[in-house]
Image (spheres, helix red, strand yellow):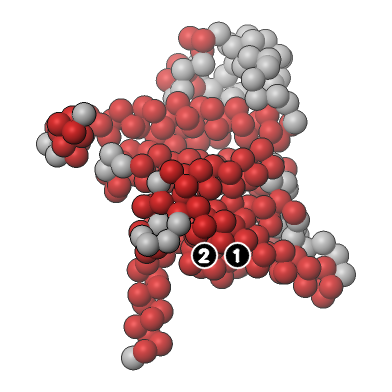
Amino acid sequence: MDAMLDYLFDLGEAHRILFASLFFILGVCVGSFANVCIFRLGEQISLVKPRSFCPACRTPIHAYDNIPLVSYILLKAKCRACGAKIPQRYFWVELVSGLIFSFLFIYAGLTIELIWGFYFITSLLIVTLIDFKKMEIPDEITVSGIFAGWLFAFVFPEIFNEVANKSGLGESVLGMMTGGGLMWVTAWLGDKIFKRESMGGGDIKLMAMAGAFLGVQGAVMTYFLAPFFAMPFGLFQKWVKKSEILPYGPFIAMAAVFSLFFGDWLLGVIISGSSG
Ligand SMILES: [Zn+2]
């Protein structure tokens, strides 16, 4: 076993490319499942039954027409039975998931962080697309995501590298409370000030999930960064589309991904800026 691990961690260039391609294919398949989640959780349909069908004509989709990326191209983005257009989203979500997984492999190597990061980012991608479309964030993703974050932290405390001496689960639970708590207070204040519901329970649970994955520091950073991501979209919505309605989940998701990859760097910049 050790010999095998040594072998895997000491990959040559050719192996690295091979693994990156394998993770791309795996990511594409997960993206295909993410598409199912985006459609079915948005429409309140069970994730397992019935099997894949065309939303336009309800004809079940054959396995050979359900190959991620490939079928979309071969079918020229049309249902084989009724000719209804298959939304571009299906193709892009699969492609982006594949790229994320192979990128994470190059970034993290064959580590538990690879699986952890992929679970987290895929969940955020699903939430983002459902929230943009339906203005809601499904508990199926966020609540199960909180438990997944705890489980990862409990079994692999090393994912929180800055808390090597503390309990991983403790950090994850504290992160969840920090993220969820900050968002809950914000929602409460928003309701008082604007006299209408500004943030939903879905946003609170999403921030709680981000905290469960990123720990306390990551939760605080995500909370403070999200408005910076939301601002340009909000201004666009107000001036171009003349609408004040904007989902907030996608910006929590963007801020969480930013914190995941650049959190330590940003913290370094802030600390060196404030001390010098
Ligand atoms: Zn059809």
Please give the name of the residue rendered at 52% of the width and 64% of the height, measured from the top-left corner: 216
Query: Left or right: where does residue 95 sit relative to residue 235?
Result: left
Please give the name of the residue rendered at 41% of the width and 79% of the height, measured from the top-left corner: 270
Q: Where does the image place residue 255, in percent across and percent down from the top left? A: 52, 60
Task: Please say if the residues under marks 1 and 2 sit with CB atoms less than 8 Å apart.
Answer: yes
Q: Which of 138 and 84 is in front in this view?
A: 138
Q: Please, is residue 25 above or below residue 185 in the view? A: above
**Residue behind label 1 places its C-beta within 8 angstroms of ligand 1:** no
Q: Please, is residue 113 above or below residue 54 in the view? A: below
Q: Where does the image place residue 248, in percent across and percent down from the top left? A: 66, 57
Q: Which of 86 and 14 is in front in this view?
A: 14
Query: Left or right: where does residue 122 sit relative to residue 195?
Result: left
Q: Where does the image place residue 95, in percent across and percent down from the top left? A: 43, 34
From this viewpoint, is residue 125 visible? no
Please give the name of the residue rendered at 71% of the width and 19% of the height, measured from the top-left corner: 56
Q: Which residue lies furthest to the bottom in this view?
A: 276
Type of amino acid under label 1:
Thr
From this viewpoint, is residue 150 visible? yes
Could you give the CA–CA distance between mark 1 and mark 2, rounded to whole angstroms? 6 Å
Disc 1 secondary structure class: helix
According to the image, label 2 marks what residue? 216
Query: Left or right: where does residue 183 sit relative to residue 87?
Result: right
Type of amino acid under label 2:
Val
Please give the name of the residue rendered at 49% of the width and 63% of the height, measured from the top-left corner: 218
Disc 2 secondary structure class: helix
According to the image, label 1 marks what residue? 178
